[in-house]
Amino acid sequence: MILDTTFLIDVMRGDSAAAEKIKYLIEKGVPLAVTTINIFELFSGVAQCSKPALERARISHILNNQTIWPLDKASAERGGRVHGELARQGTEIDPEDAMIAGIALEHNEAVLTRNVKDFSRISGLHVETY
């Protein structure tokens, strides 16, 4: 299961629903992963925050020992098609979400997110929330 940036941020902020979900997934032995896109989004936030050292430490902690999937060629193509098809339909999503979806679709993985509205419009993508 791919953890979306919204979920990662909620875990770092101590959101109780996110904490319960991560505990449940770990207890069930669900393989968890993040993407290089998540890392990009998290560090964009670091550059904008008032306490960058603290944020970098939180990010380091949450990414420790995580499987990290890159945006490879196949995932980029898949994400690009997702983004283009949704734009053509007039329901565009953020490019970063389309890239995360491309990675998830290529690896046949679900995305765990609070952003169900955008991810649920992607055909074939399994979306979980908390």
Image (cartoon, rainbow, N blue to C red):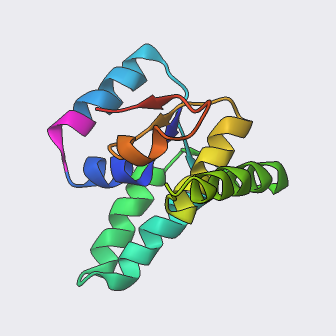
Q: Is residue 71 visible?
A: no
Q: Position of residue 100 (x, y in %)?
A: 58, 51
Viewer-nearest residue: 103 or 36: 103
Q: Position of residue 36 (x, y in %)?
A: 61, 59
Q: How many marks?
A: 0
Q: Residue at x 38, y 18 (%)?
A: 27
Q: Position of residue 45 (x, y in %)?
A: 37, 74
Q: Position of residue 117 (x, y in %)?
A: 37, 44
What range is drawn magenta here? 14-18
Q: Quadrant of the C terminus?
A: top left
Left or right, 109 with respect to 62, comes to right
Q: Residue at x 65, y 50 (%)?
A: 82
Residue lying furthest front in this view? 89
Is residue 75 covered in magenta? Answer: no
Q: Residue at x 27, y 50 (%)?
A: 10
Predominant secondary structure in magenta?
A: helix
Q: In the rendered view, would you say 34 is above or below 76?
A: above
Indicate the quadrant where residue 122 lies.
top right
Left or right, 69 with respect to 75, comes to left
Left or right, 14 with respect to 37, comes to left
Viewer-nearest residue: 14 or 60: 14
Q: Is residue 18 visible?
A: yes
